[in-house]
Image: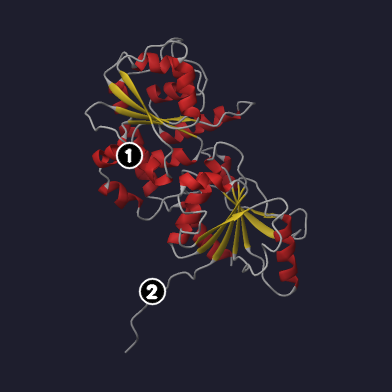
Amino acid sequence: MPAAPTSHRAPALTWDVFCHVVDNLGDIGVCWRLCADLAARGHSVRLWIDAPDALRWMAPGALEGCIQGVCVLHWTTPLAPDLLAGLPLADVWIETFGCHPPPELQEHRASAIAAGAPLPAWINLEYMSAERYVERSHRLPSRVSGGPLRGAGQWFFYPGFTPATGGLLREPDLTARQTAFDARVWLASQGLRHTDRPRASLFCYEPAALPMLLQQVGGDAPSDWLVTTGRANEAVDAALAQGLDTGRAALHRLPRLTQRDYDHLLWSCDLNFVRGEDSLVRTLWAGQPFVWHIYPQHDNAHHAKLEAFLDWLQAPPSLREFHRAWNGMGLPDGSTIWPGWAVVHGWRTCVQAARARLLAQPDLTTQLLRFVAEKR
């Protein structure tokens, strides 16, 4: 009688994830979520990061080695002496957002390869976009053009919103956690009262339309606005310094939030203002109406990126107009930005449909694991 089939789990691998902090901490946010997700799936991960201090509040315990499966290494230039001594060779290298592994590490690996060790599966994890080039460029091979590993093969991996891309970061337990979440309990933990008033979270850069928004929303139904620490809080202070009246819009200043608590903030609100990449992905999973402040580029290349995203989202006209105004692309009628809470609540249908499309696709970590298995 044949033996019963057994299930086989992919072998645990050692991953090196490289992160250069540019600004605004979005790069840390993406990299930490990826590392934590890989570790939760049984892999061993080393996060090489040049400015690790933000992890103290973003992921408490990370720097102390308290997160099982993840080791944070301070990426200095040059590397600290003896850092590479005794460090096991990684099976996978992930360079994020165009950074390159430290030259000392490349030399170390070149010596190991000369002694018979294999090359790592070397992946360029790129910026997320809904533009057409992402589908064309995803999984394309490339060659290292210089240095001790010149000629080595690597691959481009593009996060995205369609089945022809690498998908988005989504932990396996995310939906279950969200289903079990109690907004009343979480708000109370932050010193906030749960009411029937609509709530908005504010995480942004310095949008020129912010004073106008605060003025106009204050004339609508009573609402609560939860303002995040950092640039959003400073932008609100600058707006209030102009002497505007926020009327029935109550402002609440939040402390720094861990990544998990930032998810809780998004789940607790009826409208979320987000910025960059990491918070956009998290608000998509939240499934609530949102407005995205895309990272501004000096040549306005972000305008095309925003329009491509709104096309994918199938955003209704009112949501498109709000996004354009919020991102400095002109006000709908020259004087109004706030469409009213009734219109905002109507955006939920569009966002929920987009979330359902994404949930039907494999997440980024799952796709990375399959890709690495194929290439190894």
**In front here: 189 or 373?**
189
Instruction: Give the label, 2 or 1, closer to the camera.
Output: 1
User: How many circles with numbers are drawn on the protein?
Assistant: 2
- In terms of sequence position, does the residue under pointer 2 or pointer 1 come before the other? 2
Q: Position of residue 176 (x, y in %)?
A: 30, 52
Residue 32 vs residue 126: left or right? left
Secondary structure of the residue carrying tag 2 is loop
Residue 328, above or below 42 = above
Residue 127, above or below 176 = above
**In front here: 362 or 86?**
86
Secondary structure of the residue carrying tag 1 is helix
From the image, which quarter does the C terminus lie in?
bottom right
Residue 42, above or below 76 = below
The residue positioned farthest toward the left in the image shown: 196
- In space, the residues marked 2 and 1 are separated at their CA atoms by 36 Å
For the question of whether residue 168 can be seen, the reply is no
Report the residue at 32% width, 14% height from top.
Answer: 247
The local crowd at label 1, few if under 14, some if 14 to 19, many if 20 or more residues have their Cα within 10 Å, is many
Q: Position of residue 195 (x, y in %)?
A: 22, 29
Q: Which residue is mark 1?
A: 267
Q: Position of residue 21 (x, y in %)?
A: 60, 43
For residue 62, which numbered disc appears in the image? none
The local crowd at label 2, few if under 14, some if 14 to 19, many if 20 or more residues have their Cα within 10 Å, is few
Report the residue at 44% width, 16% height from top.
Answer: 240
Residue 239, above or below 123 = above
Q: Which residue is mark 2?
A: 7
For the question of whether residue 17 can be seen, the reply is yes
Report the residue at 35% width, 51% height from top.
Answer: 174
Q: For the residue marked with disc 1, what is the amino acid?
A: Trp
